[in-house]
Image: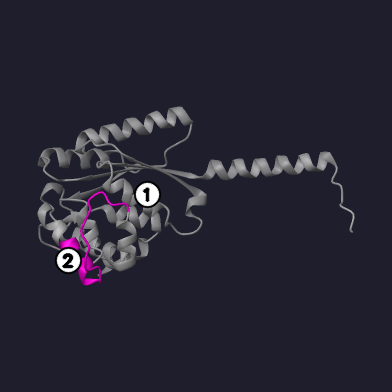
Amino acid sequence: MARKVRIPNHIKKRHERIEFKRLEEVKSKRRFYLIVCEGEKTEPNYFESLKNDLPKGVLDVCDFKIVGTGHNTVSLVNSAMALRNKWQTQTNRTVDKLWIVFDKDSFSDQSFNSAIQTCIANYPNVDCAWTNEAFELWYLLHFHYYNTGISRGQYQKLIEENFKKKGLKNYTYEKNSTEMYSLLETHASREIAVRNAVNLEKLYGGQQNYSTQNPCTMVYKLVAELFRLEKIIEEENRI
């Protein structure tokens, strides 16, 4: 049996110091994303599943915290910023990017526009993935391009119809499902959803009355940022 080589303690300690320093440097370079959602389950469930499906290596350099607050529009934006500041103070870490996710729903035009404008005013460290009218529009864009306003009651029906056409004959939409992300990844296309969302945004030509932009969603920007899908966006904007 070969004799084990005994490493002197001073060399072991030096190696330990080097490794500790390396780990500290890696930790200090990690980017911290805070994603604050209006909904307490629907959106957080989707983004938690998405987080676990990010490309290899992303989670090595990024930390993600996803929170559902139950607040709406302006109060959500104010709550998200307060939460960011609180965490930065408590953890002594910088939140590199704050994303706020909310829908138009039945909220007033003024509240919806004001929430978006507040996010824009805090650019580039704050951004919002807003949707007019409901988050489910993002799901539908995985299947087809929709450029006419859709009521909340129609979303469920259309989602069910699209999944049934993909072979899920007994599918029934559950708003707070933890499986929606995986279902969309299996039976539809995230890349198609991004392309469709980009083309929807182009319809409004930079208008700033966001409450009238129905249908439209900026969720694609958050998803694209996490998956590094900027190339798709650039291609669509050149068309």
What is the x, y in percent for residue 181?
Answer: 32, 57
Residue displayed at 35% across by 32% down: 83
Q: Is residue 234 visible?
A: no
Q: Mark 1 to mark 2: distance in Å?
A: 25 Å
> Mark 2: few, some, or many residues within 10 Å (few <14, many ≥20)?
some
Mark 2, residue position: 161
Q: Earlier in the sequence, mark 1 or mark 2?
A: 1
**Secondary structure beneath label 2:** helix
Image: 215 above or below 15? below
Which of the two residues, 203 or 184, is positioned nearer the viewer here? 184
| Residue at image location 25% in from the left, 68% down from the top | 168
Residue 85 sits in which quadrant? Answer: top left
The number of numbered badges drawn on the structure is 2
Element on which disc 1 rests: helix
Whether residue 120 is visible, yes or no, is: yes
Q: Nearer the viewer, residue 202 or 84?
A: 84
Which residue range is magenta in the image?
Answer: 158-178
